[in-house]
Amino acid sequence: MDADAIVIGAGAAGLSAAGALGADGLRVVVLEARERVGGRILSRPTDRRAIAIELGPEFVHGAAPETTAVLRAIGGTAVESGGRSWTRGADGMLHPENDTELDRAMELVRSAPAHPGDVSVDAYLCERARDPALAGAIAAARAFVEGFDAADPTLASLHGIAHEWRSAVDEFSTRPIGGYAPIVAELRRRCDAADVRVRLATVVTQVAYGTGGVAVRAADGSIVRARGAVVTVPIGVLHRAPDDRGIRFDPPLPAATARALAGIAMGDVAKVVLRFHAPFWELLEDGRYRDAAFFRDPNGPFQAYWTQMPLHGESVVAWLGGPRAACALARGRDALIAEALHGFGALLGAPEAARRAFADGTLHDWSADPYARGAYSYLRVGAGRARTALTEPVAGTLWFAGEATVDDGSSGTVDGAIASGLRAAAQVRAALGAQSGRKA
Ligand SMILES: Cc1cc2nc3c(=O)[nH]c(=O)nc-3n(C[C@H](O)[C@H](O)[C@H](O)COP(=O)(O)OP(=O)(O)OC[C@H]3O[C@@H](n4cnc5c(N)ncnc54)[C@H](O)[C@@H]3O)c2cc1C
Protein backbone atom coordinates (compact mmCIF):
# COMPACT_ATOMS: atom_id res chain seq x y z
CA MET A 1 0.00 0.00 0.00
CA ASP A 2 1.26 3.47 -0.90
CA ALA A 3 -1.08 5.18 1.56
CA ASP A 4 -3.94 4.61 3.95
CA ALA A 5 -6.28 6.80 1.93
CA ILE A 6 -6.34 8.39 -1.50
CA VAL A 7 -8.38 11.54 -2.00
CA ILE A 8 -9.34 12.23 -5.61
CA GLY A 9 -9.74 15.95 -6.25
CA ALA A 10 -8.27 18.92 -4.38
CA GLY A 11 -11.25 21.27 -4.23
CA ALA A 12 -12.80 22.40 -0.95
CA ALA A 13 -14.13 18.89 -0.25
CA GLY A 14 -10.94 17.03 -1.12
CA LEU A 15 -8.60 19.36 0.77
CA SER A 16 -10.88 19.25 3.83
CA ALA A 17 -11.07 15.45 3.79
CA ALA A 18 -7.33 15.04 3.26
CA GLY A 19 -6.38 17.57 5.93
CA ALA A 20 -8.65 15.91 8.49
CA LEU A 21 -7.40 12.41 7.69
CA GLY A 22 -3.78 13.54 7.75
CA ALA A 23 -4.30 15.23 11.12
CA ASP A 24 -5.58 11.89 12.40
CA GLY A 25 -2.28 10.27 11.53
CA LEU A 26 -3.37 8.51 8.34
CA ARG A 27 -1.02 8.51 5.36
CA VAL A 28 -2.89 10.39 2.65
CA VAL A 29 -2.25 11.07 -1.03
CA VAL A 30 -4.34 13.60 -2.95
CA LEU A 31 -4.57 13.17 -6.73
CA GLU A 32 -5.64 16.36 -8.51
CA ALA A 33 -6.09 16.76 -12.26
CA ARG A 34 -5.36 20.49 -12.42
CA GLU A 35 -2.05 22.21 -11.84
CA ARG A 36 -3.55 24.02 -8.86
CA VAL A 37 -5.72 23.25 -5.85
CA GLY A 38 -9.13 24.83 -5.15
CA GLY A 39 -11.21 23.24 -7.92
CA ARG A 40 -14.19 25.45 -8.67
CA ILE A 41 -12.79 28.15 -6.38
CA LEU A 42 -10.85 30.36 -8.78
CA SER A 43 -9.75 33.76 -7.48
CA ARG A 44 -7.66 36.44 -9.12
CA PRO A 45 -6.21 39.13 -6.87
CA THR A 46 -6.80 42.80 -7.70
CA ASP A 47 -4.97 45.96 -6.67
CA ARG A 48 -7.51 46.27 -3.89
CA ARG A 49 -6.60 43.82 -1.13
CA ALA A 50 -10.19 43.46 0.06
CA ILE A 51 -11.68 42.68 -3.35
CA ALA A 52 -10.82 39.66 -5.46
CA ILE A 53 -12.06 38.70 -8.88
CA GLU A 54 -13.93 35.46 -8.35
CA LEU A 55 -14.62 33.35 -11.41
CA GLY A 56 -16.29 30.70 -9.28
CA PRO A 57 -17.77 31.15 -5.80
CA GLU A 58 -17.87 34.61 -4.32
CA PHE A 59 -20.54 34.57 -1.60
CA VAL A 60 -20.82 32.70 1.67
CA HIS A 61 -24.46 31.66 1.80
CA GLY A 62 -26.28 31.62 5.12
CA ALA A 63 -24.57 30.79 8.42
CA ALA A 64 -22.07 28.45 6.67
CA PRO A 65 -20.50 27.05 9.85
CA GLU A 66 -17.56 25.26 8.20
CA THR A 67 -16.48 28.21 6.09
CA THR A 68 -16.88 30.51 9.05
CA ALA A 69 -14.68 28.24 11.17
CA VAL A 70 -11.90 28.36 8.56
CA LEU A 71 -12.23 32.12 8.28
CA ARG A 72 -12.03 32.46 12.04
CA ALA A 73 -8.89 30.28 12.13
CA ILE A 74 -7.08 32.63 9.75
CA GLY A 75 -8.37 35.79 11.39
CA GLY A 76 -10.45 36.58 8.33
CA THR A 77 -13.81 38.25 8.14
CA ALA A 78 -16.74 38.37 5.80
CA VAL A 79 -18.89 41.37 5.07
CA GLU A 80 -22.60 41.11 4.43
CA SER A 81 -23.43 41.98 0.85
CA GLY A 82 -25.78 44.87 0.90
CA GLY A 83 -26.97 48.00 -0.80
CA ARG A 84 -29.98 48.84 -2.91
CA SER A 85 -31.42 46.46 -5.44
CA TRP A 86 -32.93 47.60 -8.72
CA THR A 87 -35.01 45.74 -11.21
CA ARG A 88 -36.04 46.48 -14.78
CA GLY A 89 -39.79 46.87 -14.96
CA ALA A 90 -42.21 46.19 -17.82
CA ASP A 91 -41.65 49.82 -18.89
CA GLY A 92 -37.98 49.02 -19.52
CA MET A 93 -36.85 51.35 -16.72
CA LEU A 94 -34.97 50.53 -13.52
CA HIS A 95 -37.05 50.67 -10.34
CA PRO A 96 -36.14 49.96 -6.71
CA GLU A 97 -36.68 46.25 -6.24
CA ASN A 98 -39.92 45.05 -4.79
CA ASP A 99 -38.80 42.39 -2.31
CA THR A 100 -42.32 41.13 -1.75
CA GLU A 101 -42.44 39.41 -5.15
CA LEU A 102 -39.35 37.36 -4.27
CA ASP A 103 -40.75 36.62 -0.80
CA ARG A 104 -43.99 35.39 -2.38
CA ALA A 105 -42.00 33.25 -4.82
CA MET A 106 -40.08 31.71 -1.92
CA GLU A 107 -43.30 31.04 -0.04
CA LEU A 108 -44.95 29.52 -3.11
CA VAL A 109 -42.19 26.93 -3.46
CA ARG A 110 -41.48 26.37 0.22
CA SER A 111 -45.12 25.65 0.92
CA ALA A 112 -45.53 23.32 -2.08
CA PRO A 113 -47.61 20.33 -1.05
CA ALA A 114 -45.85 16.97 -1.28
CA HIS A 115 -46.61 15.53 -4.72
CA PRO A 116 -46.50 11.75 -4.65
CA GLY A 117 -43.61 10.77 -6.91
CA ASP A 118 -42.41 14.39 -7.16
CA VAL A 119 -42.94 16.74 -10.13
CA SER A 120 -40.75 19.28 -11.89
CA VAL A 121 -40.66 22.84 -10.60
CA ASP A 122 -42.05 23.89 -13.97
CA ALA A 123 -45.02 21.52 -13.73
CA TYR A 124 -45.84 22.84 -10.26
CA LEU A 125 -45.59 26.48 -11.33
CA CYS A 126 -47.78 25.81 -14.38
CA GLU A 127 -50.38 24.22 -12.14
CA ARG A 128 -50.36 27.31 -9.87
CA ALA A 129 -50.60 29.65 -12.87
CA ARG A 130 -54.36 29.10 -12.88
CA ASP A 131 -54.41 31.79 -10.19
CA PRO A 132 -53.64 35.05 -12.05
CA ALA A 133 -52.73 36.76 -8.77
CA LEU A 134 -49.64 34.54 -8.62
CA ALA A 135 -48.20 35.60 -12.00
CA GLY A 136 -45.45 37.79 -10.51
CA ALA A 137 -44.46 35.25 -7.86
CA ILE A 138 -44.35 32.45 -10.44
CA ALA A 139 -42.08 34.44 -12.74
CA ALA A 140 -39.82 35.30 -9.79
CA ALA A 141 -39.71 31.65 -8.65
CA ARG A 142 -38.76 30.48 -12.13
CA ALA A 143 -36.05 33.16 -12.36
CA PHE A 144 -34.66 32.18 -8.96
CA VAL A 145 -34.54 28.46 -9.81
CA GLU A 146 -32.61 29.29 -12.97
CA GLY A 147 -30.49 32.09 -11.54
CA PHE A 148 -29.68 30.88 -8.03
CA ASP A 149 -29.92 27.11 -8.43
CA ALA A 150 -28.57 27.16 -12.01
CA ALA A 151 -31.27 24.59 -12.68
CA ASP A 152 -33.58 23.84 -15.58
CA PRO A 153 -37.12 24.18 -14.08
CA THR A 154 -38.45 21.51 -16.45
CA LEU A 155 -35.96 18.97 -15.03
CA ALA A 156 -35.49 20.18 -11.44
CA SER A 157 -37.22 18.31 -8.65
CA LEU A 158 -39.85 20.37 -6.82
CA HIS A 159 -39.11 18.32 -3.74
CA GLY A 160 -35.38 19.10 -4.01
CA ILE A 161 -35.74 22.82 -4.64
CA ALA A 162 -38.38 23.24 -1.91
CA HIS A 163 -36.14 21.36 0.54
CA GLU A 164 -33.24 23.66 -0.28
CA TRP A 165 -35.30 26.84 -0.06
CA ARG A 166 -36.69 25.77 3.32
CA SER A 167 -33.13 25.61 4.66
CA ALA A 168 -31.75 28.99 5.63
CA VAL A 169 -28.96 28.84 3.04
CA ASP A 170 -30.29 31.62 0.84
CA GLU A 171 -31.52 33.89 3.63
CA PHE A 172 -28.49 36.19 3.48
CA SER A 173 -25.01 36.21 2.04
CA THR A 174 -21.63 37.60 2.90
CA ARG A 175 -18.33 37.90 1.04
CA PRO A 176 -14.99 36.94 2.57
CA ILE A 177 -12.76 39.99 2.65
CA GLY A 178 -9.98 39.24 0.17
CA GLY A 179 -12.05 36.54 -1.51
CA TYR A 180 -11.93 32.76 -1.28
CA ALA A 181 -8.19 32.34 -1.98
CA PRO A 182 -7.12 32.65 1.68
CA ILE A 183 -9.63 29.92 2.58
CA VAL A 184 -8.16 27.56 -0.02
CA ALA A 185 -4.66 28.46 1.16
CA GLU A 186 -5.62 27.51 4.72
CA LEU A 187 -7.13 24.18 3.64
CA ARG A 188 -3.93 23.47 1.70
CA ARG A 189 -1.77 24.53 4.67
CA ARG A 190 -3.60 22.01 6.86
CA CYS A 191 -2.74 19.27 4.36
CA ASP A 192 0.91 20.30 4.31
CA ALA A 193 1.02 20.47 8.11
CA ALA A 194 -0.33 16.91 8.24
CA ASP A 195 2.20 15.56 5.71
CA VAL A 196 -0.48 14.92 3.11
CA ARG A 197 1.08 14.42 -0.33
CA VAL A 198 -0.72 16.49 -2.96
CA ARG A 199 0.03 15.37 -6.51
CA LEU A 200 -1.10 18.00 -9.03
CA ALA A 201 -1.55 17.48 -12.79
CA THR A 202 -2.64 13.90 -12.08
CA VAL A 203 -5.79 12.98 -13.96
CA VAL A 204 -7.45 9.90 -12.48
CA THR A 205 -8.82 7.58 -15.17
CA GLN A 206 -9.62 4.39 -13.26
CA VAL A 207 -10.57 3.34 -9.75
CA ALA A 208 -10.36 -0.39 -9.05
CA TYR A 209 -11.89 -1.22 -5.69
CA GLY A 210 -12.85 -4.15 -3.52
CA THR A 211 -13.09 -5.03 0.13
CA GLY A 212 -9.29 -5.31 0.33
CA GLY A 213 -8.53 -1.79 -0.85
CA VAL A 214 -8.29 0.43 -3.92
CA ALA A 215 -5.91 0.91 -6.84
CA VAL A 216 -6.21 4.28 -8.58
CA ARG A 217 -4.74 4.70 -12.03
CA ALA A 218 -3.83 8.08 -13.53
CA ALA A 219 -3.59 9.14 -17.17
CA ASP A 220 0.23 9.04 -16.94
CA GLY A 221 -0.04 5.31 -16.22
CA SER A 222 0.95 5.56 -12.56
CA ILE A 223 -1.01 3.53 -10.00
CA VAL A 224 -1.48 4.41 -6.34
CA ARG A 225 -2.75 1.77 -3.93
CA ALA A 226 -4.42 2.42 -0.61
CA ARG A 227 -6.81 0.92 1.87
CA GLY A 228 -9.58 3.30 0.81
CA ALA A 229 -10.38 6.29 -1.39
CA VAL A 230 -12.53 9.40 -1.20
CA VAL A 231 -13.87 10.52 -4.57
CA THR A 232 -14.61 14.26 -4.64
CA VAL A 233 -14.67 14.97 -8.38
CA PRO A 234 -17.75 16.91 -9.56
CA ILE A 235 -20.87 14.97 -10.47
CA GLY A 236 -20.48 16.14 -14.09
CA VAL A 237 -17.17 14.26 -14.29
CA LEU A 238 -18.76 11.14 -12.78
CA HIS A 239 -21.48 11.29 -15.46
CA ARG A 240 -18.92 11.07 -18.28
CA ALA A 241 -18.19 7.77 -19.96
CA PRO A 242 -14.68 6.46 -19.20
CA ASP A 243 -13.65 6.93 -22.85
CA ASP A 244 -14.94 10.53 -22.76
CA ARG A 245 -12.56 11.79 -20.05
CA GLY A 246 -14.62 10.19 -17.30
CA ILE A 247 -13.46 7.71 -14.65
CA ARG A 248 -13.77 3.92 -15.05
CA PHE A 249 -14.86 2.16 -11.87
CA ASP A 250 -13.89 -1.47 -11.68
CA PRO A 251 -16.17 -3.21 -10.88
CA PRO A 252 -18.90 -0.81 -12.09
CA LEU A 253 -20.53 1.10 -9.25
CA PRO A 254 -23.45 -0.66 -7.52
CA ALA A 255 -26.91 0.05 -8.93
CA ALA A 256 -27.93 2.22 -5.95
CA THR A 257 -24.89 4.48 -6.40
CA ALA A 258 -25.35 4.68 -10.17
CA ARG A 259 -29.03 5.55 -9.68
CA ALA A 260 -28.13 8.29 -7.22
CA LEU A 261 -25.58 9.77 -9.63
CA ALA A 262 -28.14 9.77 -12.44
CA GLY A 263 -30.61 11.64 -10.20
CA ILE A 264 -28.28 14.60 -9.80
CA ALA A 265 -27.75 17.08 -12.63
CA MET A 266 -25.09 19.75 -13.16
CA GLY A 267 -26.38 23.27 -13.72
CA ASP A 268 -24.84 25.82 -16.05
CA VAL A 269 -23.72 29.33 -15.17
CA ALA A 270 -22.26 32.12 -17.27
CA LYS A 271 -20.49 34.47 -14.86
CA VAL A 272 -18.67 37.37 -16.48
CA VAL A 273 -16.58 39.71 -14.35
CA LEU A 274 -16.39 43.18 -15.94
CA ARG A 275 -13.66 45.46 -14.66
CA PHE A 276 -13.91 49.21 -15.14
CA HIS A 277 -11.35 51.96 -14.68
CA ALA A 278 -13.81 53.60 -12.30
CA PRO A 279 -17.29 52.76 -10.96
CA PHE A 280 -18.98 54.95 -13.56
CA TRP A 281 -22.49 53.81 -12.53
CA GLU A 282 -22.08 55.59 -9.19
CA LEU A 283 -22.03 58.93 -10.99
CA LEU A 284 -25.04 58.38 -13.24
CA GLU A 285 -28.33 60.22 -12.69
CA ASP A 286 -27.09 62.32 -9.76
CA GLY A 287 -25.74 59.31 -7.91
CA ARG A 288 -28.99 57.31 -8.09
CA TYR A 289 -27.01 54.04 -8.26
CA ARG A 290 -24.26 55.06 -5.85
CA ASP A 291 -25.14 52.35 -3.31
CA ALA A 292 -26.51 49.83 -5.82
CA ALA A 293 -25.75 46.20 -5.01
CA PHE A 294 -27.97 44.31 -7.49
CA PHE A 295 -29.53 45.09 -10.82
CA ARG A 296 -32.03 42.50 -12.04
CA ASP A 297 -32.92 42.34 -15.70
CA PRO A 298 -35.47 39.50 -15.98
CA ASN A 299 -35.65 39.51 -19.79
CA GLY A 300 -32.20 40.83 -20.57
CA PRO A 301 -29.16 38.93 -21.86
CA PHE A 302 -28.04 38.39 -18.25
CA GLN A 303 -30.47 37.90 -15.35
CA ALA A 304 -28.54 40.05 -12.92
CA TYR A 305 -25.54 42.31 -12.47
CA TRP A 306 -24.01 43.00 -9.11
CA THR A 307 -21.43 45.31 -7.68
CA GLN A 308 -19.16 44.72 -4.70
CA MET A 309 -21.36 46.69 -2.31
CA PRO A 310 -20.99 47.53 0.50
CA LEU A 311 -17.41 47.85 -0.78
CA HIS A 312 -17.11 50.38 -3.56
CA GLY A 313 -15.19 48.43 -6.19
CA GLU A 314 -14.55 48.81 -9.90
CA SER A 315 -15.89 45.42 -10.96
CA VAL A 316 -19.37 44.23 -11.82
CA VAL A 317 -20.50 40.63 -12.23
CA ALA A 318 -22.92 39.73 -15.01
CA TRP A 319 -24.73 36.49 -14.16
CA LEU A 320 -26.86 34.05 -16.12
CA GLY A 321 -27.84 30.62 -14.77
CA GLY A 322 -29.83 27.64 -16.02
CA PRO A 323 -30.62 26.53 -19.57
CA ARG A 324 -30.11 29.99 -21.07
CA ALA A 325 -26.57 29.96 -19.69
CA ALA A 326 -25.78 26.74 -21.56
CA CYS A 327 -26.80 28.39 -24.85
CA ALA A 328 -24.97 31.62 -24.04
CA LEU A 329 -21.73 29.77 -23.22
CA ALA A 330 -21.85 28.18 -26.66
CA ARG A 331 -21.42 31.66 -28.15
CA GLY A 332 -17.90 31.85 -26.70
CA ARG A 333 -15.97 33.95 -24.24
CA ASP A 334 -15.45 37.14 -26.25
CA ALA A 335 -19.08 37.33 -27.37
CA LEU A 336 -20.29 36.88 -23.79
CA ILE A 337 -18.01 39.56 -22.40
CA ALA A 338 -19.21 41.96 -25.13
CA GLU A 339 -22.86 41.06 -24.39
CA ALA A 340 -22.33 41.58 -20.66
CA LEU A 341 -20.77 44.99 -21.20
CA HIS A 342 -23.47 46.06 -23.59
CA GLY A 343 -26.23 44.59 -21.41
CA PHE A 344 -25.05 46.42 -18.30
CA GLY A 345 -24.57 49.73 -20.10
CA ALA A 346 -27.95 49.47 -21.81
CA LEU A 347 -29.71 48.58 -18.56
CA LEU A 348 -28.37 51.78 -17.01
CA GLY A 349 -29.23 53.78 -20.12
CA ALA A 350 -25.53 54.58 -20.46
CA PRO A 351 -23.92 52.24 -23.00
CA GLU A 352 -21.33 54.81 -24.08
CA ALA A 353 -20.24 55.58 -20.49
CA ALA A 354 -19.87 51.83 -19.85
CA ARG A 355 -17.78 51.36 -22.98
CA ARG A 356 -15.50 54.29 -22.13
CA ALA A 357 -14.93 53.09 -18.56
CA PHE A 358 -14.41 49.42 -19.51
CA ALA A 359 -11.01 47.93 -18.66
CA ASP A 360 -11.41 44.17 -19.28
CA GLY A 361 -13.69 41.18 -18.84
CA THR A 362 -13.06 37.65 -17.58
CA LEU A 363 -15.02 34.43 -17.75
CA HIS A 364 -14.33 30.79 -16.96
CA ASP A 365 -16.54 28.34 -18.84
CA TRP A 366 -17.15 25.72 -16.12
CA SER A 367 -19.46 23.73 -18.38
CA ALA A 368 -16.68 23.17 -20.92
CA ASP A 369 -14.07 22.60 -18.19
CA PRO A 370 -13.25 18.85 -18.33
CA TYR A 371 -12.69 18.77 -14.56
CA ALA A 372 -15.99 20.44 -13.64
CA ARG A 373 -18.54 19.85 -16.48
CA GLY A 374 -20.92 22.42 -15.05
CA ALA A 375 -21.25 24.94 -12.23
CA TYR A 376 -23.00 23.07 -9.41
CA SER A 377 -25.53 20.34 -8.87
CA TYR A 378 -29.31 20.14 -8.55
CA LEU A 379 -31.74 17.27 -8.09
CA ARG A 380 -33.73 15.88 -11.00
CA VAL A 381 -37.43 15.04 -10.65
CA GLY A 382 -37.91 11.86 -8.66
CA ALA A 383 -34.30 11.72 -7.40
CA GLY A 384 -35.51 11.61 -3.79
CA ARG A 385 -32.62 11.20 -1.38
CA ALA A 386 -29.96 10.75 -4.09
CA ARG A 387 -27.53 13.03 -2.27
CA THR A 388 -27.79 10.98 0.91
CA ALA A 389 -27.50 7.73 -1.05
CA LEU A 390 -24.09 8.94 -2.27
CA THR A 391 -22.81 9.10 1.29
CA GLU A 392 -23.11 5.31 1.62
CA PRO A 393 -19.68 3.65 1.42
CA VAL A 394 -19.10 1.28 -1.49
CA ALA A 395 -17.45 -2.04 -0.62
CA GLY A 396 -16.28 -0.48 2.64
CA THR A 397 -13.37 1.15 0.78
CA LEU A 398 -14.85 3.88 -1.42
CA TRP A 399 -16.55 7.06 -0.24
CA PHE A 400 -18.03 9.97 -2.17
CA ALA A 401 -17.81 13.61 -1.11
CA GLY A 402 -18.24 17.01 -2.75
CA GLU A 403 -20.98 19.60 -2.90
CA ALA A 404 -23.41 17.20 -4.60
CA THR A 405 -23.40 14.84 -1.61
CA VAL A 406 -24.92 17.15 1.01
CA ASP A 407 -28.62 17.06 1.69
CA ASP A 408 -29.10 19.86 4.23
CA GLY A 409 -29.70 22.59 1.64
CA SER A 410 -26.04 23.56 1.30
CA SER A 411 -25.36 21.55 -1.84
CA GLY A 412 -23.85 23.76 -4.53
CA THR A 413 -21.87 25.76 -1.99
CA VAL A 414 -18.32 25.82 -0.69
CA ASP A 415 -19.61 25.29 2.82
CA GLY A 416 -21.45 22.13 1.76
CA ALA A 417 -18.30 20.92 0.02
CA ILE A 418 -16.15 21.42 3.14
CA ALA A 419 -18.78 19.71 5.31
CA SER A 420 -18.92 16.76 2.91
CA GLY A 421 -15.14 16.35 3.05
CA LEU A 422 -15.19 16.33 6.84
CA ARG A 423 -18.09 13.84 6.83
CA ALA A 424 -16.22 11.50 4.47
CA ALA A 425 -13.07 11.80 6.59
CA ALA A 426 -15.04 10.73 9.66
CA GLN A 427 -16.40 7.73 7.75
CA VAL A 428 -12.92 6.73 6.54
CA ARG A 429 -11.52 7.16 10.02
CA ALA A 430 -14.24 4.94 11.48
CA ALA A 431 -13.63 2.28 8.85
CA LEU A 432 -9.83 2.32 8.65
CA GLY A 433 -8.76 4.15 11.75
CA ALA A 434 -8.30 1.18 14.02
CA GLN A 435 -5.61 -0.43 11.89
CA SER A 436 -4.15 2.60 10.11
CA GLY A 437 -0.44 2.70 9.29
CA ARG A 438 0.19 5.70 11.49
CA LYS A 439 2.92 8.07 10.43
CA ALA A 440 6.10 7.97 12.50
C1 LIG B 1 -19.63 30.28 -11.31
C2 LIG B 1 -19.80 29.66 -9.95
C3 LIG B 1 -20.26 30.45 -8.90
C4 LIG B 1 -20.43 29.88 -7.64
N1 LIG B 1 -20.82 30.70 -6.62
C5 LIG B 1 -20.81 30.21 -5.36
C6 LIG B 1 -20.96 31.11 -4.26
O1 LIG B 1 -21.11 32.32 -4.43
N2 LIG B 1 -20.93 30.56 -3.01
C7 LIG B 1 -20.73 29.23 -2.79
O2 LIG B 1 -20.69 28.81 -1.62
N3 LIG B 1 -20.56 28.37 -3.82
C8 LIG B 1 -20.58 28.83 -5.09
N4 LIG B 1 -20.33 28.00 -6.14
C9 LIG B 1 -20.24 26.54 -5.89
C10 LIG B 1 -18.89 26.12 -5.30
O3 LIG B 1 -17.86 26.60 -6.10
C11 LIG B 1 -18.81 24.59 -5.23
O4 LIG B 1 -19.95 24.08 -4.57
C12 LIG B 1 -17.57 24.09 -4.49
O5 LIG B 1 -16.43 24.85 -4.81
C13 LIG B 1 -17.37 22.62 -4.88
O6 LIG B 1 -16.26 22.07 -4.20
P1 LIG B 1 -15.95 20.53 -4.41
O7 LIG B 1 -14.72 20.23 -3.65
O8 LIG B 1 -17.17 19.73 -4.16
O9 LIG B 1 -15.69 20.37 -5.98
P2 LIG B 1 -14.50 20.98 -6.86
O10 LIG B 1 -14.09 22.30 -6.35
O11 LIG B 1 -14.95 20.92 -8.28
O12 LIG B 1 -13.29 19.96 -6.62
C14 LIG B 1 -13.20 18.76 -7.33
C15 LIG B 1 -11.77 18.58 -7.80
O13 LIG B 1 -11.66 17.36 -8.54
C16 LIG B 1 -10.74 17.57 -9.58
N5 LIG B 1 -10.93 16.57 -10.62
C17 LIG B 1 -11.92 16.48 -11.54
N6 LIG B 1 -11.74 15.40 -12.32
C18 LIG B 1 -10.62 14.77 -11.87
C19 LIG B 1 -9.91 13.61 -12.27
N7 LIG B 1 -10.33 12.84 -13.28
N8 LIG B 1 -8.79 13.27 -11.60
C20 LIG B 1 -8.35 14.03 -10.56
N9 LIG B 1 -8.96 15.15 -10.16
C21 LIG B 1 -10.10 15.52 -10.80
C22 LIG B 1 -11.06 18.98 -10.05
O14 LIG B 1 -10.00 19.53 -10.80
C23 LIG B 1 -11.30 19.70 -8.73
O15 LIG B 1 -10.13 20.29 -8.23
C24 LIG B 1 -20.15 28.51 -7.42
C25 LIG B 1 -19.67 27.72 -8.47
C26 LIG B 1 -19.51 28.28 -9.72
C27 LIG B 1 -18.96 27.42 -10.84
Image: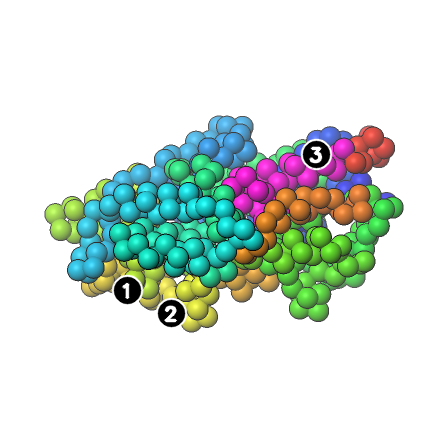
- Asked if disc 3 and disc 2 are in contact, CB closer than 8 Å, the reply is no
Image x and y of residue 91, in percent? 17, 60
Segment tinted magenta in the rendering: 401-430
- Viewer-proximal residue, 98 or 42? 98
The three-letter amino acid code for the residue at tag 2 is Ala
Question: Mark 3 is on which residue type?
Answer: Ala
Q: Is residue 346 left or right of residue 126?
A: left
Asked whether, in this view, residue 123 is left or right of residue 281, the answer is right
Number of dots carrying numbers: 3
Residue at the image position 65 percent from the left and 64 percent from the top: 240
Q: Nearer the viewer, residue 170 or 23?
A: 170
Q: Residues within 10 Å of mark 3 (few under 14, many from 20)?
A: some
Q: Earlier in the sequence, mark 2 or mark 1?
A: 2
Where disc 2 sits, the SS reads helix
Say whether disc 3 or disc 2 marks the residue closer to the N-terminus: 2
Mark 2, other Cα within 10 Å: few <14 / some 14–19 / many ≥20? few
Residue designated by label 1: 342
Please tell me which residue lies in front, 254 or 159: 159
Q: Amino acid at mark 1?
A: His
Which label's residue is closer to the chain start, 1 or 3? Answer: 1
The quadrant where residue 246 appears: bottom right
Relative image position of residue 127 (x, y in whole percent): 39, 57
Q: Secondary structure at mark 1?
A: helix
Dot 1: few (<14), some (14–19), or many (≥20) neighbours within 10 Å? some
Kindly indicate whether the residue at mark 3 contacts the one at mark 1 (C-beta within 8 angstroms): no
What residue sits 16% from the left and 46% below the top?
288
C-alpha span from label 3 to label 2: 46 Å
Q: Is residue 414 magenta?
A: yes
Label 2, on which residue? Answer: 335
The quadrant the N terminus occupies is: top right
Q: Which mark is residue 426?
A: 3
